[in-house]
């Protein structure tokens, strides 16, 4: 039965949906009330903050000698930007391939967290001076484009991890939101990676350092993966969410045993046999970034997850034939899941005794035009 208030929003909503929305609104009001209370207490104490250090571990001791530290590919440095002031409240880093996708996700997160901007204001690409990546900040969330492949994402991760270290961030969570090729799953399916494997099905990221092969573990946080899976609502989402192993390759074509590249030295039969073989071992998709993403976040003691949307079932073909409008709509699906997780964590963060209120939802460095309301 529809709501009885007469508004357009309620007209088509079920009692369950209305009740859910009311509960979410109450939780948001409760959370914001706590923030205001904390801010008042903070001001009464003379705005004295206990010194904190970053929870990020295992970083190079050489960082202490860098005065300033130049994050070249992001167009930032520690001499001209106050990292603790601008990025000190960051708790979530969401990464995706393209700048446009991450800008759209930034505005989605702003809506999900009920954060407001002055109508004359837009989010600013804070990495624009670097001419390579796009970076948007929305409250405690960074939305960053990483380009394509392990080399591109690894460069970005080095500089993002250093950024959060200089900002003294506490327990950040990294989530990659991407697209993938599915193995025996339908296009539009959302995949949460349980493991990130290399092309030999080993859980490692291989790097050649000073002429020697070095292997770094590419394990992902299982608890985080399961938590994300638990937030799927099949009857409401209208799409399927699964969890499984991901093969990360160094190439889109031959590395993923495609037949439609410029070169192909194998047969359709051997391709099918290979896909069936890895499927039997629990592999559900291909991507090109997950091992580097998992390895670098592991080394820094950062919890991380990979959530992807399948754009093609490789058991049925190699080319992406779904209409652009379908791909555009499917792109939102992993964002829905990740936004639920961030919203849930955002609303409960005030239950931690050491959590402090935000002094400013969006520092002016994050915006173009007037400041946030």
Image (tube, rainbow, N blue to C red):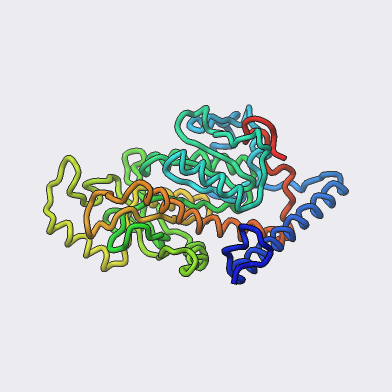
Q: Which residue is drawn at the image coordinates 52% and 50% (left, top)?
A: 300
Q: Which residue is drawn at the image coordinates 21% and 47% (left, top)?
A: 254
Residue 214 lies, in percent from the top left, at 36, 48
The C terminus is located in which quarter? top right
Q: Which residue is drawn at the image coordinates 62% and 47% (left, top)?
A: 90
Q: Nearer the viewer, residue 72 or 283?
A: 283
Residue 210 lies, in percent from the top left, at 35, 38
Q: Is residue 76 above or below residue 218?
A: above
Residue 98 appears in the picture as rendered: yes
Q: Which residue is drawn at the image coordinates 65% and 33% (left, top)?
A: 120
Question: How many circles with numbers are drawn on the protein?
Answer: 0
The N terminus is located in which quarter? bottom right
Q: Is residue 35 left or right of residue 135?
A: right
Residue 295 appears in the picture as rendered: no
Residue 321 lies, in percent from the top left, at 27, 50
Q: Is residue 352 left or right of residue 248?
A: right
State which quadrant residue 107 falls in.
top right
Instruction: Looking at this view, name the residue that lies furthest to the front.
Output: 6
State which quadrant residue 26 falls in.
bottom right
Q: Is residue 43 left or right of residue 280?
A: right
Residue 5 lies, in percent from the top left, at 69, 63
């Amino acid at each position: 039965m529809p709501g009885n208030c007469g508004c357009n929003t309620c007209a088509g909503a079920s009692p369950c949906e209305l009740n859910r929305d009311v509960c979410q609104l109450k939780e948001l009001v409760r959370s914001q009330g706590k923030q205001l209370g904390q801010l008042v207490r903070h001001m009464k104490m003379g705005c004295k903050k206990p010194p904190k250090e970053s929870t990020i571990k295992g970083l190079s001791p050489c960082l202490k000698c860098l005065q300033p530290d130049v994050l070249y590919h992001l167009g930032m440095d520690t001499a001209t930007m106050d990292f603790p002031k601008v990025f000190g409240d960051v708790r979530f880093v969401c990464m995706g391939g393209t700048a446009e996708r991450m800008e759209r996700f930034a505005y989605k997160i702003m809506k999900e967290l009920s954060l407001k901007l002055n109508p004359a204001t837009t989010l600013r690409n804070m990495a624009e001076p670097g001419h390579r990546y796009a970076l948007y900040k929305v409250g405690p969330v960074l939305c960053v484009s990483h380009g394509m492949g392990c080399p591109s994402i690894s460069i970005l991760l080095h500089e993002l991890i250093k950024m959060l270290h200089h900002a003294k961030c506490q327990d950040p969570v990294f989530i990659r939101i991407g697209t993938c090729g599915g193995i025996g799953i339908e296009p539009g399916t959302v995949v949460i990676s349980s493991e990130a494997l290399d092309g030999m099905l080993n859980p490692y990221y291989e790097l050649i350092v000073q002429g020697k092969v070095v292997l770094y573990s590419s394990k992902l946080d299982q608890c985080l993966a399961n938590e994300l899976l638990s937030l799927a609502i099949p009857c409401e989402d209208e799409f399927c969410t699964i969890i499984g192993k991901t093969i990360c390759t160094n190439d889109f074509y031959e590395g993923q045993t495609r037949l439609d590249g410029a070169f192909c030295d194998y047969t359709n039969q051997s391709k099918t046999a290979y896909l069936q073989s890895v499927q039997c071992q629990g592999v559900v998709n291909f991507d090109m970034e997950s091992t580097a993403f998992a390895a670098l976040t592991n080394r820094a003691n950062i919890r991380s997850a990979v959530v992807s949307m399948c754009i093609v079932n490789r058991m049925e073909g190699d080319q992406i034939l779904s209409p652009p409008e379908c791909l555009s709509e499917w792109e939102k699906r992993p964002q829905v899941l990740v936004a639920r997780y961030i919203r849930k964590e955002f609303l409960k963060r005030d239950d931690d005794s050491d959590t402090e209120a935000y002094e400013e939802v969006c520092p002016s460095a994050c915006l173009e035009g007037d400041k946030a309301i």
